[in-house]
């Protein structure tokens, strides 16, 4: 197909091109039978979004020991229904742990007192809890006959995953803290509850987290919490820069840079922070000593720090998105967005992709390895004013000049899920760790929540509202705290938002209470585990996949070099038979017979797949119909008179 | 020759008569051999010789082996001759078997045949195999045999290969623990006098090192004692041992107790005991010792910080002391103890009252200090006590100051945008104040009205702004619509109108529905038509009036200009955004271009100024083959770039490892993350455990076959 075809044969070639797919490397030799309309393999569904079906159960399903079943059956009849549901829940046990159980059945465990353990073996874990830690699987594995070694390896991988996920599910017990929440008294709108009420209700330590900093001199403030949530950096428009431990209110440094400050951001730890000043980007340490002045990043408007890559992303007035590696001090990539001034930027904490909002209503997604945006989404009719991405990287909230706030799905489709018109539109947006969305509109901060963990917040009713003394200029939720920090004209306000922060922190990863020594150790470890900038991609799981394109290229080259395919399946050679049964005609007949058989097999498989697909579609349709029928009120003849 | 033969026969018969015996076959053969048939010449000459030969033959026949006499018949006759031919056979019938009897063995050809057969069948003896070949054969045989025997290892090898971890040595040898006495006694030499003494005692009593229940001496003494005595003694011994073990156990248990308080009490108890004992027996020596002890205690106390307010514990307590009575008491106790210990021992220990007084003085001071320190270092702590007062004060106080500074900010270009939006909010706020009951969607109308008013006023004042945008709204609602229609292609304009209408005062719900209806009518361009507005057709909810931001009335000329710009920008924001986006998307799609192979002037009458026919052009147009469908095919408001990330691809695996035949299989095995970030510590340890562990200090012996 690469060679230029002869004139006039275009149509035919096109037809061929449609029919003939280039043989994939796993398809073996190219036979006539191989050109089938449907691909026999189905790629595994992306594990993140779609439902994961647990189809392959290669290992024997662990069973509840007999004793227990009997006990359950002996219970009263009232409980039977409840019991059945319990039994239906697939109880999972570790494979290893099961072995002693089997032994126990043979030889019942005897304690000194003679009493028997009513619940022998490890406690069962619910399927849902385990599913949370599974990585998905592929149906492909089951379909094809495999070599014994391969089978064994796959089996081992499956069992390992099972084991680790069960372990992880068990370990969830250790997450002892629970998130807080706010509940109105029968029908009371939580949005009407003001901060003073909350402060009165909570304990002293939490009440101390609501405070106002009255800093009216140096203009609107930008703010940034460190990754541990312990430290806060404030940058006033008129040059005021301060960092402090906001819980103990211990000041680390306070300086005036005598220049306009546009943004401020902590680097990997609280000891370093970057300030986007009028001309250049400056880096200060925790004592306020200027360490670097990065002149290659000029007229920076927004800063983002990617903690696992040690990259500081800067968006500039000149329209450049620059990635600065802070561990080596090199500029990794400098990309032109070709969309004018950049002043809306946020990062996707899931995959470290940078989201830029543009004045033409689009949001573009960037990674340092690509010169072009990975995705461009048309979000608003007006320019984009603010963008925020939630901690799981699933939802993106945008607000535009058309006064709309929208929430987009980032899992491949990039379609809006909900939207809402606000009287003035939101100038700033921020997602909390547990998925609350805060929007700053003028001097009011609204926080939306609800719909449960893992869902996007519903925009119809705010969860909380708070009026600030000045106009909002910066919003961020404090990690691991139920606190929303808002920088405004007159300083800084720390707002209590119950249920905003993740209640359990990882002591090894971001420990709010870490000592100096611990921080240093963490720094070394984090640097060693630094991820190269090239690996940033839309789907971080792509890295675990084989690069099929280069694999096929390699294979092709090898075949070209050798003149034959070394891994190809040998063509069918009919056996020699006696008494004239091995005539040429007979040989050909036998060959065609085998070939046809293979062909038939393949067709059968593809047909089965198609049927399955159809059935699924029909089922979906039926379900939809059912739901629509059941939910909607029955249409009546009088409907036509409705207005 | 035929006529000669009977003659010869005759002669021979005559000779036979003279000689007794004649052999039949041989003779004939000899005769025939010796006398070839040309008889004419040897008729007489060879007669003597023949006779001689006959004689010899007769003599040969004499040795008795061949007694049977053979007679030759020379003539056919009815009667058999009287000499040798028997007449018996004349009457008897000849049987077939008799005839056949003679045929078998006697046929001389069969013998020859047999010989020939033998020769034929006999293979030539092969040469001995070369040394290499024999060795190879031997090797093969040996290999087969050994491989046969080695198959018994297969399951073992397979098991070891599949084992997640192998620990060498494979079999754990149980380490035998020898008691210390046994090990040491062998080459133990008592060196120190104490050891010597002990050993001498042990040896004297013949105390066994292993089981020291009863020494031989004791046993002997037991034997020597009477039964009762022995019993008594034994009971005593048992009791003593039981007591000992009891005390030992108790001591061990007490030692394990971690409670500080318990140990403190224990220590105190002991000290008291000692004191009591001291009091009981007051000697100058003991009292001196006591004094010394106290002196040492004082020294150590003065050196250390243990009972002062500077330790970690004390500091932490000090922070809490403010609130808690109990901790305050604890701190007081500490300080009292310090005081007590650091006092010079010349004072009698009974004067507790004075100390108390001193303490009372001391502690409040400390507490004050603590308070001071917290307050001075932490300015927010003060504020914390009454945050509400501060908050309420905050906004009122600086309002004037900010107003004065507002003019400063205007100089900065960066601020401009912010101000714009602020001004806009003011504008809307005014309206909202007047019509609070209205829904949000009335706002756009008011907005447009505002635009009109603004524009008129502007025209009156001055036509400062050169941009076309502010002029347009002057003529009312018609113009902007026309504008749009001119600018954008048909499809887009149709969609844009509703938005503008809604902006100009229509109901948004209706207008937003209209594009979908249009799209359904024009099915050919469905893709493009329906979806660009998908983002915008979402049902939007109403805002609650409670959370509306407050707006301050501030009039500023420059502000107004900026605000106006902002309004216009907002009003016409959606105009060409969609068109531009679609254009961009189209460009992104058309990366692969078609190729024409048409040659100008080929196949037509040539000449200057000749133009190719379009049909010909189309005929030779070759479209590049369609790749896989784009990911954003059904997502018109999204552009997903399809370019491959080469830099990331360099980090990916690009070979298929051994046992796998499909990349999905391999991916399945590397799916579970191994790192400690994603796993529980236990799982992490198990997954990263080394495949082979070699225990140190063990000899690894080759594996042995055990049955």
Image (cartoon, grey):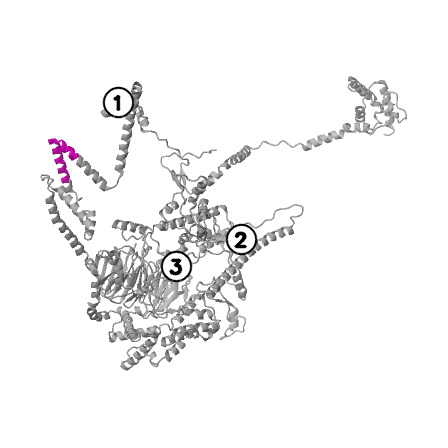
Q: Which residue is mark 3?
A: A538
Which picture quadrant has residue B259? Answer: top left
Mark 1 burial class by Cα count in 10 Å: few <14, some 14-19, many 20+:
few
Q: Is residue B115 left or right of residue B415?
A: right
The residue range painted magenta reads: B274-299
| Mark 3 or 2: the one toward you | 3
Above or below residue B197? Residue A461 is below
**Marks 3/1: CA distance?**
85 Å
Residue B629 % position (x, y): 47, 63
What secondary structure is the magenta-colored segment mainly?
A: helix
Q: Does residue A141 appear anywhere in the picture?
A: yes
Which picture quadrant has residue B10? Answer: top right
Q: Which residue is mark 2?
A: A29
Read off the chain for label 1: B
Read off the chain for label 2: A
Q: Does residue A282 appear anywhere in the picture?
A: no
Q: Which residue is mark 1?
A: B201
Tell whether label 1 touches label 3 (CB within 8 Å).
no
């Amino acid at each position: 197909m690469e060679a230029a075809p002869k004139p006039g044969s275009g149509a035919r070639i096109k037809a061929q091109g449609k029919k003939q797919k280039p043989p994939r490397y796993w398809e073996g030799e190219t036979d006539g039978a191989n050109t089938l309309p449907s691909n026999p393999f189905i790629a595994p569904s992306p594990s993140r979004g779609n439902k994961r079906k647990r189809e392959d159960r290669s290992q024997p399903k662990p069973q509840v020991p007999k004793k227990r079943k009997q006990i359950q059956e002996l219970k009263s009849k009232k409980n039977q229904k409840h019991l059945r549901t319990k039994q239906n829940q697939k109880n999972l046990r570790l494979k290893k742990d099961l072995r002693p159980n089997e032994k126990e059945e043979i030889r019942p465990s005897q304690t000194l007192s003679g009493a028997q353990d009513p619940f022998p073996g490890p406690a069962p874990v619910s399927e849902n809890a385990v599913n949370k830690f599974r990585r998905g699987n592929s149906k492909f594995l089951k379909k094809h006959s495999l070599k014994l070694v391969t089978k064994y390896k796959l089996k081992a991988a499956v069992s390992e995953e099972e084991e680790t996920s069960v372990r992880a599910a068990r370990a969830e017990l250790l997450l002892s803290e629970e998130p807080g929440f706010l509940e109105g008294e029968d029908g009371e709108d939580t949005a009407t509850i003001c901060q003073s009420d909350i402060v009165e209700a909570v304990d002293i330590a939490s009440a101390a987290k609501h405070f106002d900093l009255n800093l009216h001199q140096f203009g609107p403030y930008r703010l940034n919490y460190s990754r541990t949530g312990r430290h806060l950096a404030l940058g006033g428009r008129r040059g005021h820069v301060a960092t402090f431990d906001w819980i103990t209110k211990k000041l680390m440094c306070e300086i005036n840079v005598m220049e306009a400050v546009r943004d401020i951001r902590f680097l990997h730890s609280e000891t370093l922070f970057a300030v986007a000043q009028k001309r250049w980007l400056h880096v200060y340490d925790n004592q306020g000593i200027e360490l670097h002045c990065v002149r290659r990043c000029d007229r920076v408007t927004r800063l983002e720090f990617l903690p696992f890559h040690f990259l500081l992303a800067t968006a500039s007035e000149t329209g450049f998105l620059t990635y600065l590696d802070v561990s080596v001090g090199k500029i990794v990539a400098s990309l032109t967005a070709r969309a004018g001034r950049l002043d809306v930027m946020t990062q996707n904490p899931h995959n470290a992709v940078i989201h830029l909002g543009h004045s033409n209503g689009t949001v573009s997604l960037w990674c340092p390895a690509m010169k072009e945006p990975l995705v461009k989404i048309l979000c608003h009719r007006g320019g984009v004013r603010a963008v925020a991405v939630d901690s799981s990287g699933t939802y993106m909230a945008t607000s535009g000049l058309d006064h709309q706030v929208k929430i987009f799905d980032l899992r491949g489709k990039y379609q809006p899920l909900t939207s809402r018109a606000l009287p003035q539109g939101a100038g700033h947006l921020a997602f909390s760790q547990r998925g609350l969305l805060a929007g700053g509109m003028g001097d009011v901060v609204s926080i939306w929540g609800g719909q449960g963990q893992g869902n996007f917040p519903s925009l119809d009713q705010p969860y909380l509202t708070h009026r600030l003394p000045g106009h909002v200029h910066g919003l961020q939720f404090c990690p691991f705290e139920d606190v929303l920090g808002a920088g405004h004209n007159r300083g800084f306000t720390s707002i209590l938002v119950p249920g905003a922060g993740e209640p359990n922190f990882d002591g090894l990863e971001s420990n709010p209470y870490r000592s100096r020594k611990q921080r240093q150790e963490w720094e070394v470890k984090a640097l060693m585990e630094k991820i190269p900038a090239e690996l940033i991609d839309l789907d971080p799981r792509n890295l675990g996949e084989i690069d099929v394109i280069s694999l096929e290229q390699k294979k092709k080259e090898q075949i070209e070099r050798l003149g034959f395919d070394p891994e190809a399946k040998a063509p069918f050679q009919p056996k020699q038979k006696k008494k004239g049964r091995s005539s040429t005609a007979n040989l050909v007949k036998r060959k065609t017979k085998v070939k046809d058989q293979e062909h038939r097999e393949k067709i059968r498989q593809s047909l089965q797949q198609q049927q399955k697909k159809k059935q699924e579609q029909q089922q979906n349709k039926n379900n939809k119909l059912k739901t629509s029928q059941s939910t909607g009120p029955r249409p009546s003849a009088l409907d036509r008179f409705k207005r | 020759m035929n006529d000669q033969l009977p003659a010869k026969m005759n002669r021979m018969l005559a000779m036979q008569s003279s000689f007794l015996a004649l052999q039949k076959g041989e003779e004939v053969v000899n005769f025939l051999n010796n006398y070839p048939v040309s008889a004419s010449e040897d008729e007489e000459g060879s007669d003597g010789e023949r006779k001689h030969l006959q004689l010899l033959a007769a003599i040969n026949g004499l040795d008795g082996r061949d007694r049977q006499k053979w007679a030759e018949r020379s003539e056919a006759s009815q009667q058999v001759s009287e000499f040798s031919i028997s007449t018996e056979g004349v009457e008897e019938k000849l049987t077939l078997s008799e005839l056949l009897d003679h045929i078998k063995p006697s046929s001389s050809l069969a013998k020859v045949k047999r010989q020939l057969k033998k020769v034929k069948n006999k293979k030539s003896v092969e040469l001995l195999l070369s040394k290499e070949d024999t060795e190879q054969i031997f090797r093969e045989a040996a290999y087969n045999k050994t491989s046969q025997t080695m198959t018994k290892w297969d399951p073992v090898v397979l098991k070891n290969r599949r084992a997640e971890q192998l620990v060498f040595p494979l079999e754990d040898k149980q380490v035998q623990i020898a008691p210390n006495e046994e090990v040491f006694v062998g080459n133990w030499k008592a060196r120190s006098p104490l050891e010597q003494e002990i050993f001498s005692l042990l040896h004297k009593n013949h105390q066994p090192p292993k089981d020291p229940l009863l020494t031989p001496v004791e046993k002997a003494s037991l034997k020597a004692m009477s039964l009762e005595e022995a019993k008594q003694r034994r009971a005593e011994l048992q009791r003593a041992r039981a007591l000992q073990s009891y005390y030992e156990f108790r001591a061990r248990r007490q030692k394990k107790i971690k409670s500080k308080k318990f140990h403190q009490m224990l220590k105190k108890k002991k000290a008291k005991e000692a004191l009591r004992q001291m009091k009981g027996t007051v000697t100058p020596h003991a009292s001196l010792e006591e004094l010394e002890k106290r002196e040492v205690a004082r020294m150590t106390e003065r050196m250390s910080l243990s009972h002062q307010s500077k330790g970690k514990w004390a500091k932490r307590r000090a922070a809490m002391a403010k609130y808690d009575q109990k901790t305050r008491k604890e701190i007081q106790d500490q300080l009292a103890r310090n005081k007590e210990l650091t006092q010079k021992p010349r004072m009698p220990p009974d004067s507790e009252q004075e100390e108390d007084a001193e303490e009372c003085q001391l502690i409040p001071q400390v507490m004050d200090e603590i308070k001071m320190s917290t307050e001075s270092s932490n300015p927010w702590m003060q504020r914390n006590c009454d945050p509400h007062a501060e908050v309420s004060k905050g906004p009122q106080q600086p309002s004037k100051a900010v107003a004065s500074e507002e003019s400063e900010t205007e100089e900065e270009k960066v601020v401009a945008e912010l101000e714009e939006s602020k001004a806009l909010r003011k504008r809307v706020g005014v309206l909202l104040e007047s019509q609070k009951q209205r829904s949000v969607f009335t706002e756009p109308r008011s907005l447009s009205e505002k635009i009109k008013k603004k524009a008129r006023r502007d025209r009156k004042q001055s036509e400062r702004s050169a941009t076309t945008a502010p002029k347009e709204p002057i003529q009312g609602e018609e113009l902007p619509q026309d504008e749009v229609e001119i600018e954008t292609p048909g499809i887009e304009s149709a969609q844009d109108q509703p938005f503008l209408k809604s902006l100009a005062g229509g109901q948004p719900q209706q207008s937003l529905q209209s594009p979908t209806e249009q799209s359904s009518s024009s099915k050919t361009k469905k893709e493009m038509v329906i979806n660009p507005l998908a983002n915008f057709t979402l049902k939007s909810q109403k805002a609650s009036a409670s959370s509306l931001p407050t707006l301050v009335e501030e009039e500023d000329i420059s502000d107004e200009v900026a605000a106006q710009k902002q309004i216009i920008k907002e009003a016409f924001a959606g105009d060409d955004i969609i068109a531009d986006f679609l254009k961009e998307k189209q460009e992104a799609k058309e990366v692969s271009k078609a190729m024409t192979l048409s040659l100008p002037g080929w196949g037509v009458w040539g000449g200057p100024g000749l133009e190719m026919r379009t049909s010909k052009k189309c005929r030779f147009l070759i479209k590049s083959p369609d790749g896989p469908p784009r990911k954003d095919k059904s997502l018109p408001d999204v552009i997903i770039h399809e370019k491959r990330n080469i830099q990331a691809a360099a980090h990916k695996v690009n070979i298929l490892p051994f046992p796998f035949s499909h990349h999905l299989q391999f991916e399945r095995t590397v799916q579970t993350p191994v790192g400690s970030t994603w796993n529980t510590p236990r799982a992490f340890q198990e997954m990263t455990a080394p495949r082979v562990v070699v225990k140190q200090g063990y000899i690894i012996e080759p594996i042995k076959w055990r049955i």
